Amino acid sequence: MSYRSELYKKALEELEDRRSKAVLEQAENRSLAFSKIPELEALSREISSVGTKLYRIYESRENVAQRVEELSRENMKQNERFERLLTENGFAPDFLELKYFCPKCRDTGFVNGEQCECLKALVKKEASLRLNFTSPVTLSDFDSFRLSYYDEKPDPKTGVSPLSRMKAIFEYCRDWANYFSRSSKSILMQGKTGLGKTHLSLAIARCVIEQGYDVVYGSVFNLMSRIEQEHFGKKENEDSYEHLLNCDLLILDDLGTEFSSGFTKKAIYSIINTRLLAQLPTIISTNLSMEEMLETYSDRVVSRLLNGYDRLVFLGRDIRFEKRKKQ
Ligand SMILES: [Zn+2]
């Protein structure tokens, strides 16, 4: 099953759950009200037998118009009495009605053949949950990114102030996420461990998911093992790989940590190349320097990253260390 259909399956299960809850709640309310007001039960049976009565009138073909009129009047009175009995006994007039979580689609997820907002929201929630589950940290956002961890003093080697570099990178990422589209430019995040690459890519993921896009986030290590297993296991199940090629935004964390094999090398090249040709945005983060990338990957991989991606080089000292110092 593809990633997307897994999400929909989950969302539809949740809707099914909501419907069952509504039905169960109605049954409980009925038994409560009927035990308190015995007359209600008989009245309720009378009211719901109106369809059968109508059918009999039409079938007999005698005095149809007049008898339908009488039945309708009687039904109205019964309904009024029903509501009055409820309110006189301290219940809301709609106490016994089915209360759907989403009255618009009656918890079916569809209105006139179109997806209801509640179904879309559930799919998004499920996608975020999975993202959270597979990512190493809880889903970050831009608000929790602290520029104060970065030095203002220029780095002696590069002459660049980590703070001003990171401020520019932060703003670039925030704008990129806010104005995301399926044709946004791809990003290569480079820099040592603990400089905020994962934080910013997760913040982007969250923002883009909230706009309703289909985002896949994962470490290259995990994603590669998954598709390798699928590839060498059941041949017919290569959906994860397909999804990496087609999703609106793919975020590959920690390029260079995967087990290097002929298979992973081919897969990484193919993912990068296919998505570039389709002009679909990808974010890749890596601790490797350009020289290390050239040692690890073929020239064609590195040249695609250099030519097709905006390159952000993170500067500073390990934030996780700085955070601990300030605690
Ligand atoms: Zn709905």
Image (cartoon, rainbow, N blue to C red):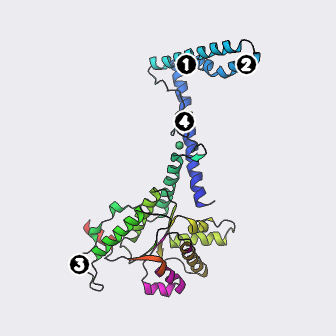
Type of the residue with mark 4: Ala
Give the label, 3 or 4, closer to the camera.
3
Contact between labelled residues 1 and 2, with CB atoms less than 8 Å apart: no
- What kind of element bears circle 4? helix
Residue tagged 3: 153
Residue tagged 4: 22
Earlier sequence position, callout 3 versus callout 1: 1
At 30% from the left edge and 84% from the top edge, which residue is drawn? Answer: 158
Give the label, 2 or 3, closer to the camera.
2
Q: Position of residue 309 (x, y in %)?
A: 46, 76
Residue tagged 2: 58
Contact between labelled residues 4 and 1, with CB atoms less than 8 Å apart: no
Type of the residue with mark 3: Lys
Q: Which mark is residue 191?
A: none
Residue tagged 1: 79
- What kind of element bears circle 3? loop
Q: Name the side, left or right, on which 46 lies relative to 258.
A: right
Between residues 48 and 24, which one lies in front from this camera angle? 48
Earlier sequence position, callout 2 versus callout 4: 4
Report the Cα–Cα distance between label 3 and label 4: 61 Å
Q: Quadrant of residue 27?
A: top right
Report the Cα–Cα distance between label 1 and label 4: 22 Å
Type of the residue with mark 1: Asn
Give the label, 2 or 1, closer to the camera.
2
Report the Cα–Cα distance between label 2 and label 1: 23 Å
At 51% from the left edge and 57% from the top edge, which residue is drawn? Answer: 127
Q: Which residues are magenta?
A: 277-306
Report the Cα–Cα distance between label 2 and label 4: 34 Å
